[in-house]
Amino acid sequence: MFKLTYISTYPPTHCGIAEYTRFLVTALKSVRPDVKIHVLSDKSNQTFKLSGGVEVHPVFEFKANSYRSILDELTLIGGVDVLHVQHEYGIFGYNDLILEAALEAKREKLVKSVIFTLHSVYHPLSGNDGALDLQKKLNSVDAVIVHSYLMEFELQNQGLDPLLIRRIPHGTHLNPFLETPRHELLNELQLKEDDISGMTLVTPGFLRIDKGLDLLIQSINNLDKKDSMTLIIAGEKRLGTREDKEMFDFIEDACKRLNIILVEKYLSSEEILKLAALADIIILPYRDRPALYSVSGILHLSMGSFKPLLGTRVPRLIELYQFAPRATVPPKKPEQLSKTLRWYIRNYEHMVAYMANLYSYAVRTQWIRMARRHIKLYRETLAT
């Protein structure tokens, strides 16, 4: 048995990394119930709690000026074997403070092994010196986990030792609601049967400009039979920029003209899975920020539902492009999205069959399998 501590956001914080960590620790506990797991989380959790056999300690603030509190908490719990940072720049800021805190914990012998999962990797063309500086300094940790080939090779190009980089795909949760009757799904999602007609299109996740929702609406508006489908846009508003606000205004205006259901709320993973079970087609029309690599957690929740997916050809959806290239279109091209969506609707059964490679990948990347790969890595770093 070994002791494992994650530094990460954690539910109820509204954050994709929080959900990622929850899925991972749940799978780890099912594989190795004897492993002692602590999560040093953001202070949104407010109080210490036990969650599924995992001890959650609210310790740090978002983009803090110091992470000394993490060392204090590690001292209180008596040190651990592995310290694993679930790193996202939106949580820890564009600096190396969290890295320095983790390395200080190792110097003080509070931890034996330090591992980082980079959920975002910046390219030099981004001009983001803070992120690039952190990425260069990661040669000082015991392992760096990334989720895609693009992220792996970008870090190599930036000078990170290839032996430190481990590509472990984002985990996939196979949808347990696929056999749930439609009327039950609608009732649990607080949707009305009368509001939904024809083909059901779903796009879930935070409502931001990078989700390309305005392009999706333009593409549907171009269709001849747009009245024979329903688009469900569901997620929490993230109006951080003027462009975000303009996009949301565009969506609200489109709701008056098209058959669009706007579910404006934070969605739990369970609610996203129920929406995916309700969908005929799941659409991810993303427009990625330039010079930034990541993968989509929504993609993994979606492909575990074994429904046809349609997305854009962007780094965040590299796995969709890899395993179902015909299910992708160039970003920022609503006309091409319209054309492909029209073809999907006319050839629905063909697209279900075409998605077989992606569905196989979903099965291969189930959370329990990714948890085993994490455990293997933890053992390797402790052995060295």
Image: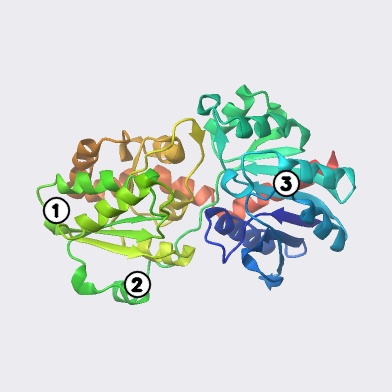
Q: Give the amino acid at mark 3.
A: Lys
Label 1 crowd bin: few (<14), some (14–19), many (20+), radius 10 Å:
some
Q: Nearer the viewer, mark 3 or mark 1?
A: 1
Check residue 376 in the rendering and tell me which mark sits there, or answer none: 3
Q: Nearer the viewer, residue 251 or 336?
A: 251
Label 2 crowd bin: few (<14), some (14–19), many (20+), radius 10 Å:
some
Q: Give the amino acid at mark 2.
A: Leu
Q: CA distance from mark 2 to mark 1?
A: 24 Å
* Label 2 SS: helix
Which residue is identified by label 1? Answer: 226
- As drawn, which residue projects farthest toward the right? 108
Would you identify the image quadrant in which residue 128 lies?
top right
The location of residue 280, given as percent across then percent down, is 28, 57
Which residue is identified by label 2? Answer: 185
* Mark before the other along the chain sequence, 3 or 1: 1
The location of residue 332, given as percent across then percent down, is 29, 36
Left or right of 51? Residue 170 is left
Left or right of 68? Residue 260 is left
